[in-house]
Amino acid sequence: DNMSRVVSVRFNENEINALNNIADTHGVGLSTMIKTLALEKLSDDYDIKVIKEYEESKKNKKIELVNHDEAWKEIGIEE
């Protein structure tokens, strides 16, 4: 379900200061900043995974690249 949950994380004083500085720079609270950073990291990791899969498929010739005009023709749209 979409219920929010509270997660407790321990940070040392230097880490809290750094996170507070970042949060202040972005004009958000500490919790929002930590959540944003965590979700951005997950998104970045997913993007890297997709890129690696694409590069592996390309290297193994499992995908075929076509130019713009050919792509439009394949889907039935002529320019």
Image (tube, rainbow, N blue to C red):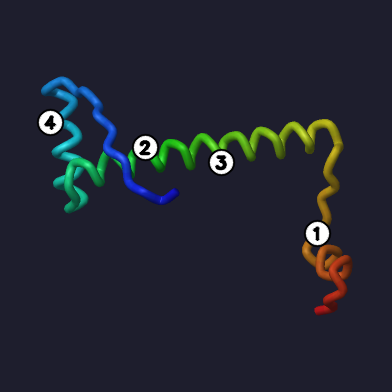
Q: CA distance from mark 2 to mark 3?
A: 14 Å
Image disc number at residue 67: 1
User: Three-letter amino acid code at disc 4?
Assistant: Asn
Is disc 3 placed on a helix, strand or loop? helix
- Of badges 1 and 4, nearer the viewer stands 4
Neighbour tally class for label 4: few under 14, some 14-19, many 20 plus, Cα within 10 Å: few
Neighbour tally class for label 2: few under 14, some 14-19, many 20 plus, Cα within 10 Å: few
Q: CA distance from mark 2 to mark 4?
A: 17 Å
Left or right relative to 24: residue 63: right
User: Three-letter amino acid code at disc 3?
Assistant: Asp
Q: Position of residue 29 (x, y in %)?
A: 17, 47
The residue shown at (14%, 23%) is 14
Image disc number at residue 38: 2
Left or right relative to 43: residue 29: left
- Of badges 2 and 1, nearer the viewer stands 2
Q: CA distance from mark 3 to mark 4?
A: 29 Å
Q: Position of residue 58 (x, y in %)?
A: 79, 38
In which quarter of the view is residue 31 placed?
A: top left
Q: Which residue is disc 4 drawn over?
A: 17
Is disc 4 placed on a helix, strand or loop? helix
In which quarter of the view is residue 56 placed?
A: top right
Q: CA distance from mark 3 to mark 1?
A: 23 Å
The residue shown at (82%, 50%) is 65
Q: Residue furthest top?
A: 12
- Of badges 3 and 1, nearer the viewer stands 3
Q: Which residue is disc 3 drawn over?
A: 47
User: Three-letter amino acid code at disc 1?
Assistant: Asn
Q: Earlier in the sequence, mark 2 or mark 3?
A: 2
The residue shown at (85%, 47%) is 64
Q: Is residue 43 above or below residue 70?
A: above
